[in-house]
């Protein structure tokens, strides 16, 4: 995203910023920046219905710039689209004050954002992050097992399931060669490769690394299938683009073909060698360390909102190894008080205690793991026992997935998903 | 301009169409025609008398002449002589009674309109050409029609004035049969026609023709005269245009198609007949045949990778006579070519190319063999840690376990899958275990009794720690590759001679370990539950087949079952148990069900087949009571229920409990190994789970917990 202009007062955080989203991932940043009650000024398509004197109506669509008081945000990670709903805050010749409108933010079109209760430290950090122009690492991953392949795109902030291929494979049967099974596996590989190539769109975008991960030998077999496909003409597959793909392939191990094994894949040495220094590499590392400490149960790793707040109060998340891991979904809360609670916590750790704060993307793999723990976790500088037993019976809070973005679920909707299984 | 012209031309062309038969033979007094008159006049008269209409011979002859010997039309013509629109048509060779009836009915419903006449005309032409042996292109191309001679006679008919011009254009594409015809009449030979037959039409034909004609005679002419069209009649009385078109298509495709359709109908009937349920009382039958049956058991072969599971089973099958020496020799040769001659026996079980190439079993293989004393099903599980999900699938179908340990490499297995497999075997509910201490011939010294004793002690400890009962464990020293003490006891002269003194062979041990089927009758009377382990193509006659072990209830040919979670229904077409066709199968048996009325895409391995009356409902989240083996947090996990492998998330650690299920701590932060706890697990979709089902929870390729659904 490019910052076009800004007039934010350092002191009270008032003012606005004008931004230009340039690539799909910028929509994700916008989703985290824009909150309900903010003022958003952006171009929109509005359908105007006019009624003539005789009572006949005609409608036309006009391009106009609207200023909205945001009421709701809806992010579609598959298409990287952000729908913003709100009430019109500035009248113009097409719309009345207080009218409702939902607009899609568009790439290459400026939008101006004014924070209702000022730009707080987290918002500013997010703004800084979003306008960082350094080239971002992008890679693809195919997490597979026999009969199942999840093709996903891994960017700095998101892991997006782009396509799931699910095929029912017959098992090997009886003695002798099980040709049905072999044939089905070949057909499965063909489908996965075709789907992958369609997703990669090699003709229009430079090749990025493609991780093939599976338990057993499926990924290796798939790699050799791609190699053989590249050396012979396979119907429906362009050999030239395939040759460009070959050097980008990377085989890794995963415990299963399901998406949550991606964490293991991203932590594997083959991957970290290629993708080190990225934001998510560091976050995955921190999450692993947290899990490890938690397993040891030495009182230095805690999770859950109440526990962490208590730990911060006690000054346990400070200089010398204190790390606060917090999911950005917490800042997306509709409730201003809830957001303020977390912003205060972050400010306290960062400014007063000197600890490290990591805001994890809720749609990234490490962030998803954190979501499971209630969205907030910490590695303490000194062990504290029984944080959960202090002050009442209620220990960890329920992990309810209310407003958490679930890309898997959205992946199902309307997308071309091969042999997707629907529940009844 | 050109376009408009064409349209006009088309319409003209349409009217021409009626007149194309105008120039038929004028020679009314020819010998042949005379005899035709003589033959047909009485017939027409009979029909007319029946309808209470008087007509002179001359009039009948005229009508017949004009209608080109069509008795039915002549009759209608004479009846409706007052209505000028009812100009009789000609050109009909097939004069079946059915046709007559149909035409008559057509006449008085929609048939009297110009449009229907046109359509009928064309149809008849088509039928005529078909009968004449020429090509059955009933849909006359415009070009053909252009060449026909014009005749303006037809245009004199008054009804054509109000004819909506659009309809003819449309109809031109589809020769339309008489609209109210219920089914295309089966073509009958015109020669077989008998006057007396025609004289007394069936009730069917009468309903079709006579009554509406009379009804219309009262009202329709007046209306039609007023409006000049039949449109005033109930527009929905006749069949819809779509029906008309469909019928026309059906008709125009000729007799061969209708015959085919007929054949198809018969076919589907016969299919239904074959899968009609015999209505067997399966539990009773099962109990009655109990005496005749040999004991049967399925055993899963478990153990660490490369400890020789597949080879041992290859040996067992070979020596038990289930696999011919010739096949094994063939494998031997092929394996030698790949420098893997020691894998030849394993190839009996490992049939996949990849499996053979890498020398590792990927998925469990299933094989039946019989001894004089019992029927066995081998489920040869993979030992590699990545394929533990497949091992769970195999173990969940078994009645007992054969644990294979490499006497020389006990350590690797103790840390690896020997231990994990023992845990999993216990977790899926297996009680009896036969431990095959393998590769004793490769020990140093060969067949060292000390080594065997030592391995026996270690493994026994592990099994006892995993809550197997002492009396359920049997140890067998053996060599899969050499074949000693598998089926045949080693020779007295060999270093393994000590074995036969104190130990059974593997086969004997298996026969002695067959667990009794507990509460057989009770389980069989429960509703049907079978987890699908494999979906495959059972052959040309059985395109959709599934395999699995029936966990409760029974199934017989003709039963209708439902598959969860897809909710689709299927009919059981055939049942195979132990590779033999059977009429029914009961709980505890591993069987193949050949299905019909379902698409393979609705079936996945791991799905549940249930009886229609008592289906299992899918659940999005369940509470599990688990024994924890690895630390657990609220985190994503893999949940295994037999062959079913689904991703899930632990959404809540509900409580830790003691041995009796009493709460120890509410909402623990972390579950540690050795604890017993309740956890809440949520799935992405809905999963068919029954209370009490055995569940295994794995994470990152490690078994983390096992337990049951609450």
Image (tube, helix red, strand yellow):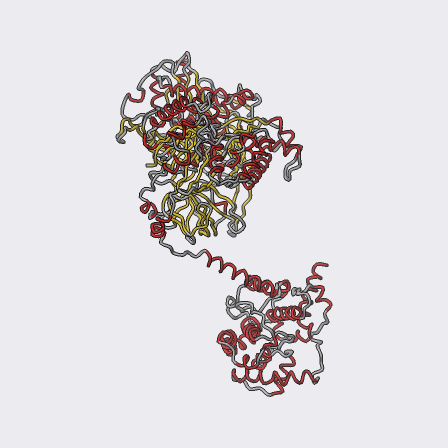
Rendered location of residue B406, percent (x, y): 45, 26
Is residue A259 in sight in this rendering? no
Query: For the C terminus of chain A, which image quadrant?
Result: top left
Q: Is residue B560 left or right of residue B25?
A: left
- The residue located at (44%, 17%) in the rendering is A11
Residue A390, x across and y down, in percent: 28, 21
Question: Which of these two is toward me, A209 or A154?
Answer: A209
Left or right of B455 on screen, residue B14? right
Quadrant containing the N terminus of chain A is top right
> Taking A315 as reference, is B473 above or below it?
below
Image position of B575 (left or right of B430)? right
| Residue B272 placement (x, y as % from top left) | 47, 58
Q: Quadrant of residue B339?
A: top right
Q: Residue furthest front?
A: B493
Question: Quick check: B396 left or right of A160?
Answer: left
Camera-side residue of B84 and B557: B557
Question: Camera-side residue: B150 or B35?
Answer: B35
**How many numbered marks does the figure carry?**
0
Q: Nearer the viewer, residue B111 or A280?
A: A280
Q: Position of residue A375 (x, y in %)?
A: 40, 26
Dividing the picture into quarters, in which one does residue B342 lie?
A: top right
């Amino acid at each position: 995203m490019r910052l076009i202009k800004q007039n934010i007062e350092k002191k009270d955080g008032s003012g606005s910023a004008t931004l230009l989203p340039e690539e799909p991932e910028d929509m994700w940043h916008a989703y985290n920046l824009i909150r309900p009650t903010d003022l958003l000024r952006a171009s929109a398509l509005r359908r105007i219905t006019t009624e003539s004197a005789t009572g006949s109506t005609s409608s036309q669509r006009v391009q106009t710039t609207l200023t909205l008081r945001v009421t709701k945000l809806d992010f579609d990670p598959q298409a990287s689209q952000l729908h913003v709903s709100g009430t019109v805050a500035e009248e113009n010749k097409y719309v009345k004050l207080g009218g409702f409108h939902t607009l899609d933010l568009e790439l290459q079109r400026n939008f101006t954002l004014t924070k209702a209760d000022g730009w707080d430290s987290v918002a500013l950090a997010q703004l800084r992050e979003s306008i960082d122009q350094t080239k971002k690492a992008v890679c693809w991953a195919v997490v597979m097992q026999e009969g199942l392949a999840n093709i996903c795109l891994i960017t700095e902030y998101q892991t997006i399931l782009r396509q799931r291929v699910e095929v029912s494979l017959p098992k090997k049967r009886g003695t002798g060669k099980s040709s049905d099974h072999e044939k089905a596996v070949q057909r499965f590989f063909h489908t996965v490769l075709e789907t992958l190539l369609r997703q990669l769109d090699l003709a229009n975008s430079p090749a990025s690394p493609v991780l093939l991960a599976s338990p057993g030998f499926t990924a290796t077999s798939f790699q050799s299938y791609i190699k053989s496909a590249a050396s012979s003409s396979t119907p429906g597959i362009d050999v030239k683009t395939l040759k460009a793909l070959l050097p980008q392939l990377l085989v890794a191990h995963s415990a299963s073909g399901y998406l949550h094994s991606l964490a293991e894949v991203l932590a594997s040495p083959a991957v970290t060698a290629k993708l080190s220094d990225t934001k998510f590499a560091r976050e995955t590392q921190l999450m692993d360390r947290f899990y490890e400490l938690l397993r040891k149960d030495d009182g230095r790793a805690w999770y859950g909102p109440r526990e962490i707040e208590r730990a911060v109060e006690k000054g346990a998340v400070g200089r010398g190894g204190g790390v606060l891991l917090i999911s950005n979904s917490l800042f997306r809360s509709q409730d201003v008080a809830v957001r303020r609670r977390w912003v205060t916590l972050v400010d306290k750790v960062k400014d007063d205690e000197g600890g490290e704060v990591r805001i994890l993307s809720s749609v990234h793999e490490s962030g998803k793991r954190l979501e499971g723990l209630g969205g907030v976790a910490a590695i303490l500088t000194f062990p504290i026992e029984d944080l959960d037993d202090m002050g009442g019976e209620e220990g960890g809070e329920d992990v309810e997935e209310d407003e958490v973005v679930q890309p898997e679920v959205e992946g199902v909707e309307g997308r071309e998903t091969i042999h997707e299984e629907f529940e009844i | 301009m050109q376009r408009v012209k064409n349209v006009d031309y088309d319409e003209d062309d349409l009217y021409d169409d009626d007149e194309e038969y105008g120039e038929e033979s004028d020679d009314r007094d020819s010998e042949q025609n005379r005899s035709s008159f003589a033959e047909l006049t009485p017939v027409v008269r009979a029909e007319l008398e029946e309808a209470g209409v008087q007509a002179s011979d001359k009039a009948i002859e005229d009508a017949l002449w004009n209608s080109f010997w069509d008795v039915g039309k002549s009759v209608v013509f004479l009846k409706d002589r007052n209505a000028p629109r009812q100009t009789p048509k000609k050109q009909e060779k097939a004069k079946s009674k059915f046709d007559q009836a149909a035409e008559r009915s057509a006449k008085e419903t929609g048939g009297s309109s110009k449009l229907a006449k046109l359509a009928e005309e064309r149809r008849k032409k088509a039928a005529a050409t078909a009968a004449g042996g020429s090509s059955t292109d009933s849909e006359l191309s415009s070009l053909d029609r252009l060449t026909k001679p014009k005749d303006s006679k037809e245009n004199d008919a008054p009804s054509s004035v109000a004819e909506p011009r659009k309809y003819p254009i449309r109809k031109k594409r589809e020769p339309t049969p008489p609209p109210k015809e219920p089914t295309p009449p089966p073509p009958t030979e015109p020669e077989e026609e008998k006057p007396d037959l025609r004289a007394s039409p069936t009730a069917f034909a009468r309903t079709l023709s006579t009554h509406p004609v009379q009804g219309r005679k009262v009202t329709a002419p007046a209306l039609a005269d007023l409006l000049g069209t039949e449109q005033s009649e109930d527009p929905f009385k006749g069949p819809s245009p779509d029906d008309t078109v469909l019928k026309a298509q059906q008709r125009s495709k000729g007799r061969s198609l209708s015959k085919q359709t007929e054949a198809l109908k018969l076919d589907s009937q016969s299919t239904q007949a074959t899968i009609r349920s015999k209505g067997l009382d399966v539990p009773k039958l099962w109990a009655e045949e109990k005496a005749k049956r040999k004991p049967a058991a399925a055993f899963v072969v478990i153990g660490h990778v490369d400890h020789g599971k597949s080879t041992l089973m290859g040996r067992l099958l070979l020596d038990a006579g289930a696999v011919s020496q010739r096949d094994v020799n063939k494998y031997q040769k092929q394996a030698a070519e790949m420098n893997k001659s020691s894998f030849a026996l394993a190839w009996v079980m490992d049939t996949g190319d990849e499996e053979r190439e890498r020398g590792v079993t990927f998925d469990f293989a299933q094989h039946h063999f019989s001894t004089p004393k019992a029927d066995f099903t081998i489920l040869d599980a993979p030992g590699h840690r990545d394929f533990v999900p497949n091992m769970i699938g195999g173990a969940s179908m078994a009645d007992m376990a054969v644990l294979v340990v490499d006497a020389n490499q006990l350590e690797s297995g103790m840390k690896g899958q020997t231990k994990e497999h023992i845990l999993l075997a216990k977790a899926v509910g297996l009680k009896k275990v036969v431990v095959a201490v393998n590769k004793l011939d490769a020990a140093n010294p060969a067949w060292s009794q000390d080594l065997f004793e030592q391995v026996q002690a270690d493994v026994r400890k592990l099994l006892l720690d995993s809550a197997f009962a002492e009396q359920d464990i049997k140890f067998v020293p053996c060599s899969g590759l050499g074949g000693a003490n598998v089926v045949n006891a080693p020779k007295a002269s060999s270093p393994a001679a000590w074995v036969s003194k104190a130990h059974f062979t593997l086969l004997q041990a298996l026969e002695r370990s067959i667990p009794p089927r507990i509460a057989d009758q009770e389980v069989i009377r429960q509703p049907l539950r079978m987890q699908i382990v494999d979906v495959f193509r059972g052959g040309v006659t059985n395109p959709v087949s599934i395999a699995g072990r029936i966990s409760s209830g029974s199934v017989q040919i003709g039963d209708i079952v439902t598959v969860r979670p897809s909710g689709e229904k299927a009919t059981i077409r055939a049942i195979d148990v132990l590779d033999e066709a059977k009429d029914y199968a009961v709980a505890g048996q591993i069987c193949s069900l050949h299905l019909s009325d379902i698409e393979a895409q609705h079936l996945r391995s791991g799905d549940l087949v249930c009886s229609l009356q008592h289906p299992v409902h899918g659940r999005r989240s369940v509470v599990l009571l688990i024994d924890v083996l690895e630390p657990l947090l609220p985190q994503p996990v893999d949940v295994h229920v037999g062959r079913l492998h689904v991703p899930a998330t632990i959404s809540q650690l509900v409580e830790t409990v003691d041995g009796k299920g009493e709460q120890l701590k509410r909402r623990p932060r972390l579950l540690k190994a050795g604890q017993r706890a309740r956890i809440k697990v949520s799935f992405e979709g809905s999963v068919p789970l029954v209370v009490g089902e055995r569940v295994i929870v794995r994470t990152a390729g490690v078994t983390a917990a096992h337990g049951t659904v609450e």
